[in-house]
Amino acid sequence: MSLKSIVRELKEMRDGIGSMSRRGGGGSDGRPGHGRAGSRHSWPGLWPEQPQRHGQVQSQEGPQQRQGRWANLPPELLLDVIQRVEASEATWPARRQVVACAAVCRSWREVTKEVVKTLEECGRITFPISLKQPGPREHPVQCFVRRDRATSTYLLYLGLSPSLHGENDKLLLAARKVRRAARTSFVISLVSDDFSHSSSTYVGKLKPNFLGTKFTIFDSQPPSDAVVLPNNKPSKRQSKQVSPRLPLGNYSVATVTYELTVLRNRGPRRMQCTMHSIPALCIQEGGKAPTPMGTIQSLDEQVSTLPTSKGKEPALEFSSTSLSADLSGPVCTNESPLVLKNKAPRWHEQLQCWCLNFRGRVTVASVKNFQLVASVDPSLDIPAAEQEKVILQFGKIGKDIFTMDYRYPLSAFQAFAICLTSFDTKPACE
């Protein structure tokens, strides 16, 4: 059987499973295959280790039989097939076939996890966990952000710019600005129509202070090799845990600070990002940033966050510089976190404006445009070339359209959350 025939049959199997889930599940809960309009607005419903729902055992009996036949392939042949699919399907939406291979059965999933490298190694976004992994070192991951003013929603897509029709645009993350009595916050999700903290698609959030000068990025899970530092005494509601595999709560992974402008001097914003989850030494030659290897969580797994009281949620501080797996005590480490600063623009006399070299990725002047580089201590002996390398850049190319390019050691989630700080009101900085 040819490779194309195998991929075609896998696609038919995947579509069959999706249609049966829609008939069996019903409702619109924000997960793939549940009545959401447009496949480009979601990740495929083919996450590894999906538990079966009670009401779908009989309806999926046919697909299970077909999967049993594919599970008996010789290991050498299976490895060759998945390697060919992974090499041929390099971009989305064709890369859905790689995800389909991981959803066939357990043996296919294990081989696919071995074949598909991390984002840092291969430069390709495949599974949702890629959004929490550091970007490639040699070249940036190019994305764009679309803002919807009516719904206060921000959508992050993979690609150079929006396509003509939009069907091929791959949605990576979505955020919604939630306004409360005293302040606002941004909730980040895997899908564009479910921003509930209790949803399995919840990724994290961004919370500013009252003046809009300091933003805290919270992750729904602690990153790899992290040790939690509780900033208050544990309470009864913090001790409850729905799943032992998923530590509950919001974990502070980064802080973005904007310089306070007392005299309201006109000029570009000055910002500084402290990445608590990334050690500064990771940008050295041979350095390594924390890289999660598992799945974020299954789309079909019902996971609820900690109970809240009057909109307040327990926040936990952590540091990734320790290699210990104990999440109960403080961290004893001498490593400092990575600090990013915005690259200083130059004043253009002829244009009478501040300018940065975005290499053609930004075309509209805006106070939101910025580039971030590493701000390191001279004692760390990091080469000047690494200090000048742009790790994240963000800028405007049209009405409500922005580009976002990020690279190692930032992940897509971290980069997107940093860019979201540009959209919030900053009365003390402007």
Image (cartoon, rainbow, N blue to C red):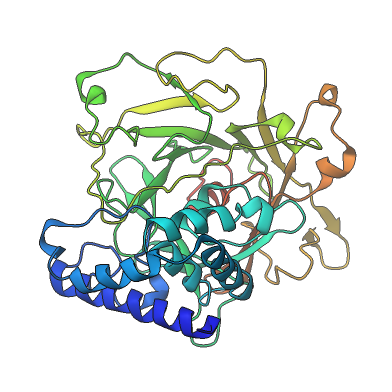
* Camera-side residue of 390 and 358: 390
Front residue (pair 365, 143): 143
Q: Residue at x 41, y 38 (%)?
A: 221
Seen in the picture, residue 409 relative to 75 is either above or below; the reply is above
Q: Residue at x 69, y 39 (%)?
A: 340
Residue 206 picture location, percent across and down: 44, 43
119 versus 385 height, above or below: below
Q: Is residue 27 left or right of residue 175?
A: left
Q: Residue at x 54, y 84 (%)?
A: 2
Between residue 6 and residue 201, name the one nearer to us: 6
In the figure, is residue 100 to the left or right of 395? left
- In this picture, residue 205 sits left or right of residue 156: left
The residue lying toward the viewer, choosing from 331 and 58, is: 58
Answer above or below: position of 337 versus 386.
above
**Residue 412 place in picture, x, y as percent:** 56, 53
Identify the image quadrant of residue 394. Answer: bottom right
Q: Where's residue 139, x and y in %?
A: 75, 59
